[in-house]
Image: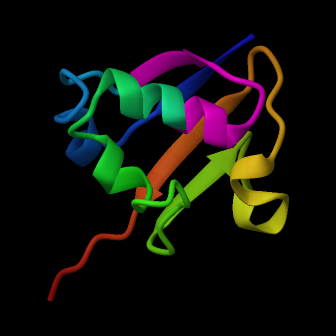
């Protein structure tokens, strides 16, 4: 089963410039783990050392915030889309 992961430009730089990636997995966490293995520089921007999502990075599964529906344990289906939105600081 494969889902499409959408990255903002700031994270795409760490994934060979790719803004959309296809990745396998049965849960959001498995998809993120797959991407972390393929793009090691991207991994620390998505999750902590324990493999949990950072509070300041929001993951949307088909436009739904996963924090409200299982977190990294949220199941995915073939064709689903995950959008990753990191918090941006500024002033």
Q: Quadrant of the C terminus?
A: bottom left
Q: Residue 67 appears in which quarter of the rendering?
A: bottom right
For image coordinates 43% across by 28% down, the residue present is 35
Magenta region, residue range? 20-32
Q: Residue 43 appears in which quarter of the rendering?
A: top left
The location of residue 19, given as percent across then percent down, is 34, 27
Whether the magenta-drawn stretch holds residue 66 is answered as no
In this figure, which colouring scheme has been used for the structure?
Answer: rainbow
Q: Is residue 38 above or below residue 29?
A: above
The location of residue 12, given as percent across then percent down, is 26, 34
32 or 60, which lies in front? 32
64 or 32, which lies in front? 32
Q: Is residue 18 above or below residue 31?
A: above
The location of residue 40, given as percent across then percent down, is 26, 34
Q: Is residue 17 above or below residue 72?
A: above
In this image, 35 relative to 88: left or right? right
For image coordinates 27% across by 43% down, the residue present is 11
């Amino acid at each position: 089963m494969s889902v499409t992961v959408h990255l903002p430009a700031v994270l795409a730089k760490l994934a060979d410039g790719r803004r959309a990636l296809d990745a396998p997995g049965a849960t959001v966490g498995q998809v993120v783990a797959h991407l972390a293995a393929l793009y090691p520089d991207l991994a620390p921007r998505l999750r902590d050392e324990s493999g949990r999502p950072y509070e300041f990075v929001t993951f949307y599964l088909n436009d739904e915030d996963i924090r409200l529906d299982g977190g990294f344990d949220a199941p995915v289906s073939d064709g689903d889309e995950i959008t990753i939105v990191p918090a941006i600081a500024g002033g």
